[in-house]
């Protein structure tokens, strides 16, 4: 059989479309889809997608079609509900701008972002767990020396975070780049306070571990904050009777040669939202309980002007790129076995 464009009298509209890039398929390659009963529709869609030459894309879309069709069947989706869903997604897209990504937020509040993150960054026992990056990281945080200040003391209650960067054998990792960022005591990131002239960097910084893997920096105790909730995702959460808050956290990222990049965060014991994070970022291994130091001499020694500070003593354990690869193969096989069993 010929290609579509070889068929006599195929029509100008079709020829125009092919000229503009529509695939000029071979008619022999097309499946024979004639039975559109509910039983056959899923197979039909999968059959006509078989021409995809990217095997991963073909595989992922085949699973997506199966899950979408079985979802429609399972809930008995009505035309009104189908339209409600489409209108919601339309509003979600319309809410997106260069600095507002409502679709990522949607993925976050359904736990999909956390699931993708966890699945793709499995850790062996003892290694520091990863968590979601969030939208407030910037590339050009200013560098501070070990023990330096990433937040002005007027930005909140002072906290000294210190410890070591180690591998899973306890060997120190020198010269590890550490990026860290957090809210001020009002629950805002510096970028959320940007005016016409941009923003003034505060509560973020970068530093390097020393030759023994030591690091330390002065910051402030972060506080809980709301996710953006003035759009369709916020409305959805209200309709589900869900709150829109994240527990306080200190974001941290670690980059060292030969090691998997670690994106993580520390959370703090006693936070009212620790067990109901709107975006499912909390892992119990990342919860810290900083102790309050009330000795003014200690405060001066650490470099604080105030007399009291929180001390958060925390080591971070990185895994090598090879360990990361091995863990990923194991975790994906296990997740797939569980998903196909379910
Ligand atoms: Fe955050």
Image (cartoon, helix red, strand yellow):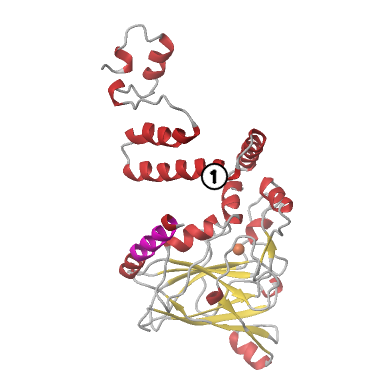
Asked which secondary structure carries label 1, the reply is helix
The residue lying toward the viewer, choosing from 224 and 178, is 224
Q: Magenta includes 332?
A: yes
Name the residue furthest left.
1
Which residue carries the number 1 mark?
71
Picture quadrant of residue 124 = bottom left
- Exactly how many numbered labels are in the figure? 1
Would you place residue 79 above or below residue 62 in this image? above
User: Which residue: 40% across, 9% down?
Assistant: 11
Q: Quadrant of ligand 1?
A: bottom right
Give the left or right position of residue 1, taking residue 125 as reference.
left
User: Which residue: 68% across, 74% down?
Assistant: 271
Give the left or right position of residue 304, taking residue 43 as reference.
right
Query: Pointer 1: residues within 10 angstroms few (<14), some, or many (20+)?
Result: few
User: Which residue: 58% across, 44% down?
Assistant: 98
Percent of width and height locating residue 119: 44, 61
Q: Which residues are magenta?
A: 328-339
Would you place residue 88 above or below residue 155 in this image? above
Q: Magenta includes 108?
A: no
Picture quadrant of residue 33 = top left
The residue lying toward the viewer, choosing from 261 and 4, is 4
The residue lying toward the viewer, choosing from 94 and 111, is 111
Q: Quadrant of the N terminus?
A: top left
Percent of width and height locating residue 169: 35, 82
Percent of width and height locating residue 95: 64, 42
Would you place residue 271 above or below residue 106 in this image? below
Q: Looking at the magenta stretch, what is its main secondary structure? A: helix
Asked if the residue at label 1 sits under 8 Å from ligand 1, the reply is no
Percent of width and height locating residue 253: 48, 67
Would you place residue 307 above or below residue 49 in this image? below
């Amino acid at each position: 059989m010929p290609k579509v464009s070889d068929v006599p009298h195929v029509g100008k509209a079709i020829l125009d479309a092919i000229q503009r890039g529509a695939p000029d398929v071979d008619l022999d390659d097309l499946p024979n889809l004639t039975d559109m009963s509910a039983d056959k529709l899923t197979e039909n869609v999968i059959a006509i997608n078989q021409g995809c030459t990217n095997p991963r894309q073909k595989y992922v879309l085949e699973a997506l079609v199966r899950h979408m069709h079985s979802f429609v069947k399972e809930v008995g989706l009505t035309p009104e509900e189908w339209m409600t869903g489409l209108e919601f997604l339309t509003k979600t897209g319309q809410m997106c701008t260069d600095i507002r990504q409502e679709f990522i937020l949607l993925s976050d509040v359904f736990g999909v972002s956390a699931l993708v993150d966890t699945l793709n960054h499995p850790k062996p026992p003892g290694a520091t767990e990863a968590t979601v990056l969030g939208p407030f990281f910037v590339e050009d945080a200013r560098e501070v020396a070990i023990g330096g200040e990433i937040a002005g003391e007027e930005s909140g209650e002072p906290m000294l975070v210190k410890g070591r960067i180690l591998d899973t054998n306890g060997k120190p990792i020198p010269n590890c780049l550490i990026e860290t960022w957090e809210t001020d005591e009002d629950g805002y990131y510096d970028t959320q306070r940007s005016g016409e002239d941009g923003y003034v960097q505060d509560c973020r910084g970068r530093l390097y571990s020393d030759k023994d893997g030591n690091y330390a920096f002065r910051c402030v105790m972060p506080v809980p904050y709301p996710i953006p909730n003035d759009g369709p995702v916020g409305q959805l959460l209200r309709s589900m009777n869900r709150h829109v808050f994240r527990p306080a956290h200190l974001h941290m990222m670690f980059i060292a040669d030969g090691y998997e990049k670690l994106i993580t965060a520390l959370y703090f014991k006693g936070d009212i939202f620790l067990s109901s994070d709107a975006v499912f970022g909390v892992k119990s291994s990342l919860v810290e309980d900083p102790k309050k130091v009330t000795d003014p001499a200690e405060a001066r020694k650490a470099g604080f002007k105030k007399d009291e500070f929180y001390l958060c003593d925390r080591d971070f354990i990185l895994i090598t790129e090879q360990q990361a690869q091995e863990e990923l193969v194991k975790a994906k096989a296990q997740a797939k076995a569980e998903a196909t069993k379910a």
